[in-house]
Image: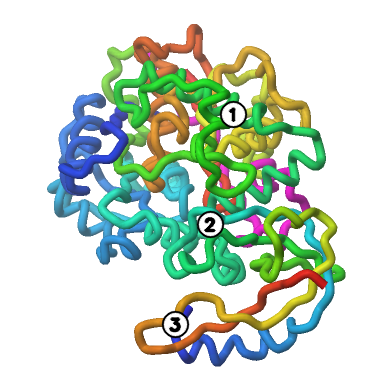
Amino acid sequence: MKSPVKLWRNQKKVRDLVGLVGTVVSWTTIRVPPAGFSDQAPYVVALVALGRRRIMAQLVDVDLSSVSVGLRVITVVRRVTKPSQDGIIPYGIKVKPL
Amino acid sequence: MNIFIPGVATTKFGELWGVSPRTLAHEAAGGALRDARLEPKDIEAVFVGNMLSGMLGGQEHLGAFFAEELGLAAPAFKIEGACASGGLAMHNAINAVSSGQYRTVLVLGIEKMTDHRPEDVAAALMGAGSEEERTAGATFPGLYAILSRAHMAAFGTTSADLARVAVKNHAHAARNPHAQFRTKITVEDVLKSSMIADPLHLLDCSPISDGAAAVIVSSVKHHVSRKNAVQVAASAVATDTLGLAQRKSLTELAATREAARRAYRESGMSPKDIDVIELHDCFTIAEILALEDLGVVPKGRVPARRGGVVVNPSGGLKGCGHPVGATGVKQIAELVEQLRGSAGERQVPNSRVGLAHNVGGSGGTAVVHILTV
């Protein structure tokens, strides 16, 4: 995930996904995170419908108690995990309430 | 061609800090050979089911690794399909014997997980998911939590319904000397345990485990004095998208439905013919989905009764433990014991037909085997 070449290759995909509006289909709160995400937990991971397309993304800038199915959200670019030891900061798509 | 399973063995599952993968392999493979009354020289090929040895242990090339370790100068293959690696290894072994290429082969399912930090194991397991899911910071409890919430919304399934799966599987595991958790629990215990990924509690989740299981697959009816020679009636595999977001439905695992359809067709059997099932309860919701998708209970009808079939007599992944590459092979070993009538305290009476169901990831792979005696 932190290979600079791979991050560069994924830029286009990320660009195409910014600023899209959708709704939460199902979601969970991750309380026991995988390596790299400990500084963000607990956080919400949501399955989001963006028109006919669906994505899995972290839901940020939200009060945990106010998440519900049908919540309207918009895709944004955010830092994914802590920087690697080489200082590379991976960015990716997350969603926040509209 | 008739395909027989003349030998099986399972190691203790659990946090085996004092035991190496080499030792686990010897115990499982040696046990299966003794059970079949065969010698190492009778083994013509080895199929190793494993997921994480590369990511966690830095060791790949497991075919040659375990062939050397077990003193088997035979062709050897590592088969990887996430948590379905064991079932996939079994499928490949059966195909290899069916083809006539080999007469007798060894299937070894093995995983060593507890040597590593839990957050590293959680991240490595996400290798079974999609890049998008890893970027989202999802975990496997998280993905099955999303399935749980969808099932609850569609059918009114409750946390107590989920908890009852764990309670039953712990009760079964209490009778299995190889199980990781030989402790009975209550619905209240499950609901009071800490939340891992809402709505899944700690006791809705199968554990991180070490363990191995081995099975001999042969076209020869070895050890003919044994009356109850267990045979393979069907071996079927199906795949689906790696990521949950790309699925048509969140209330079924389409790969399970398809693998089951193929297995029922191959064996000429239907769900009502099955006496005993070992299925993939990596999380409590997974057992409910599997019972529905295998056609044992109607979709959305939370299984209070299972029509007489006994599910997960070994304790399942929840109670017996889930060393991911070993699980699919352990399921076969358990069914063989049940069909022979040698399962001791956990024997399901009059078992003639058994079904094993092994899932990789959140349903990207499903493997279904049907065994008969």
Mark 3, chain letter? A
Side of B9 where B38 appears, left or right? left
Tag 1 and tag 2 share a subunit:
yes
* Secondary structure state at the residue bearing disc 2: loop
Query: In the picture shown, does residue A74 fall above or below B254?
Result: below
* Secondary structure state at the residue bearing disc 1: helix
Please rate how many residues cluster around mark 1, counting C-alpha atoms within 10 Å: few if below 14, some from 14 to 19, many from 20.
many
Seen from the viewer's position, the closer of residues B38 and B215 is B215
Quote the CA–CA distance across marks 3 and 2. Answer: 20 Å
Pinpoint residue B65: horizontal percent, then vertical percent.
20, 57
Query: In the picture shown, does residue B174 fall above or below B40?
Result: above
Q: Disc 3 vs disc 2: which is toward the camera?
A: 3
Q: Amino acid at mark 3?
A: Pro
Q: Is residue B245 magenta?
A: yes
Residue at the top extreme of this rendering: B349
The reply to whether discs 1 and 2 touch (Cβ–Cβ < 8 Å) is no
Q: Which residue is mark 2?
A: B139
Question: Which residues lie in the magenta part?
Answer: B228-257
- Residue drawn at (51%, 40%) of the image: B194
Quote the CA–CA distance across marks 1 and 2. Answer: 20 Å
- Residue drawn at (26%, 61%) of the image: B57
Tag 3 and tag 2 share a subunit:
no
Q: Which residue is mark 1?
A: B163
- Do we see residue B184 in this rendering? yes
Q: Which residue is mark 3?
A: A83
Side of B336 where B68 appears, left or right? left
Q: Looking at the rendered structure, which numbered label has been put on residue B348?
A: none
Q: Quadrant of residue B338?
A: top left
Q: Amino acid at mark 2?
A: Thr
The reply to whether discs 3 and 2 touch (Cβ–Cβ < 8 Å) is no
Pinpoint residue A23: horizontal percent, then vertical percent.
83, 64
Quote the CA–CA distance across marks 1 and 3. Answer: 39 Å
